[in-house]
Image (cartoon, grey):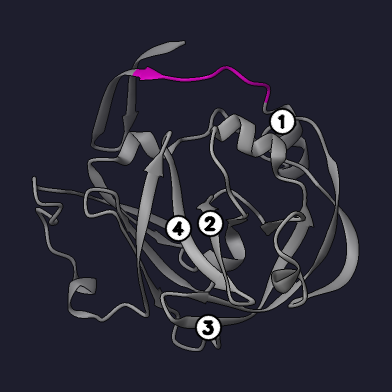
Amino acid sequence: MSIDSLIIRELYFTDVQADVVNLGHIETAKGIKILGLLGANLFTDMEMVIDERNSKLILYKLDKEGERIFKGEVDTLIPDIEIPIELYNNIIFLGAEAGGKKLRFCFDSGAEINALDNMVSNKVLNHFTLTNRAVLGGSSDQNVGVLRGELDFLIIDQDTLKNMPFVLTGLTNLETVYNTTLDGILGFPFLEKGLVIINTKKKKLYQYFYMEETR
């Protein structure tokens, strides 16, 4: 369906394409009213700054070269991670490495946990330590059983993130929805490590680790 207008503070969008889905199960799980979910397609002409620790989303308008029209103080800092991203079907993808294998992750700021496809190479699984079983829910009302554990290391932009929590589950259905291949999802455990900046015009993701964060 098409929404004639959407207003977010000083931002005004028209003719917004949206899917109608039942979000009641998420409302029940979180105990809050949820009127909708916002996708990356709304912000392709902006730079997104996601500051999980301070519960902030900052949006910067960009010029044709992908530079901020208004410069922020973070410009003077050197990011701990700077990695190319791919925007495919309005989903953000980035590369990582584990067990000597290249992996393709989608970035989902709404995911409560990182997910790893159970079909990844055994060289990757050799670095996965199982801790317990859990039930995973999503934007649909279906829950799936998963194996919860940790990857002893995940390399992103030559920076090693140690003991990253993941659930091990099948991602075939998600690949069908996204119409592409992927090895996993990076969500909240990645976000909580530091401030994340996404610039889709430059096709880059930057992360500035919080001061006391250990990797």
Q: How far is the residue under mark 4 from the one under mark 3?
A: 15 Å
Task: Check residue 140 in the rendering and tell me which mark sits there, or answer none.
Answer: 1
The residue positioned 55% from the left and 88% from the top of the image is 214
Mark 2 → mark 3, Cα distance in angstroms: 16 Å
Q: Is the C terminus in the top left, top right, bottom left or bottom right quadrant?
A: bottom right
Q: Amino acid at mark 4?
A: Leu
For disc 3, the marked residue is 160
Please give the count of numbered marks on the rendered protein: 4
**Residue 142 occupies quadrant:** top right
Where does residue 92 sit, x and y in percent of width and height? Answer: 43, 48
Q: Which residue is mark 4?
A: 94
Q: Answer yes or no: is residue 178 visible.
A: yes
Q: CA distance from mark 1 to mark 4?
A: 24 Å
Query: In the rendered structure, which amino acid carries the disc numbered 1?
Result: Ser
Span colored in magenta: 16-22
First along the sequence among labels 1 and 4: 4
First in residue order: circle 4 vs circle 3 = 4
Residue behind mark 2:
104
Q: Is residue 19 magenta?
A: yes
